Image: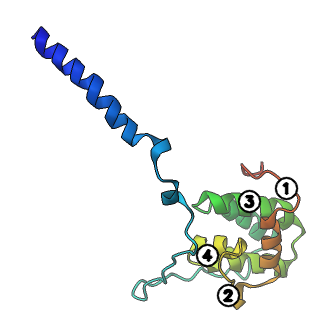
Amino acid sequence: MLRQFLVSTAVRRVVVPSMAQTRCASNLDKSEYTTPGEIVDYDDPPHIPVPEYPSRPDEPLETRKQRLLYQSRKRGMLENDLLLSTFVAKYLKSFTADQTAQYDDLINGVSNDWDIFYWATETKPTPPEFDTEIMRLLKEHVKNAEKVQRIRQPDL
């Protein structure tokens, strides 16, 4: 039994370091981890209906702004949570009723949050129906000319 233990220990000393050397992260080809040149995006399948967001014409402006504040913070993807929550914290209080309606249409009229992210970061062109004053303001916010750190959502 002692001989078997010594043999297995000797094998581990020889085999394991050579295996670890081939799997070391610094030996990996870095070209495997480059960002793709274009975004691969698939259209939504036509057989899956996307539900329409209910319009709320009688909703008071302050209630709508409170709802949009919440919806901007809880998007389901961290990238949009950070971008939209900081955007809303900066601009929503000064929005008119028309601007608030445009923002509501933007974040609730799109079925895929990645679309909002790609449009705001100008990775993909914005469709004409969403290319509004609010989208242009959001694009400027995303450029972050003030170099503000946006690593967490603003306090409520």
Q: Residues within 10 Å of mark 1 (few under 14, many from 20)?
A: few
Residue 33 image position (x, y, % from top left): 52, 58
Q: Mark 1: which amino acid?
A: Lys
Q: Earlier in the sequence, mark 1 or mark 4?
A: 4
| Camera-side residue of 76 and 136 | 136
- Label drawn at residue 147: 1
Q: In this picture, is 34 found above or below 155?
A: below
Q: Which residue is the extreme one toward the top? A: 2
Q: Earlier in the sequence, mark 3 or mark 1?
A: 3
Secondary element type, mark 1 = loop
- Label drawn at residue 115: 4
- Label drawn at residue 127: 2
Q: Which residue shows up at 72% across the image and 83% down it?
A: 57
- 2 and 4 marks in contact (CB < 8 Å): no
Q: In this picture, is 4 found above or below 107?
A: above
Spatial CA distance of label 1 from label 2 is 28 Å
Q: Give the quadrant of the N terminus.
A: top left
Q: Mark 4: which amino acid?
A: Asp
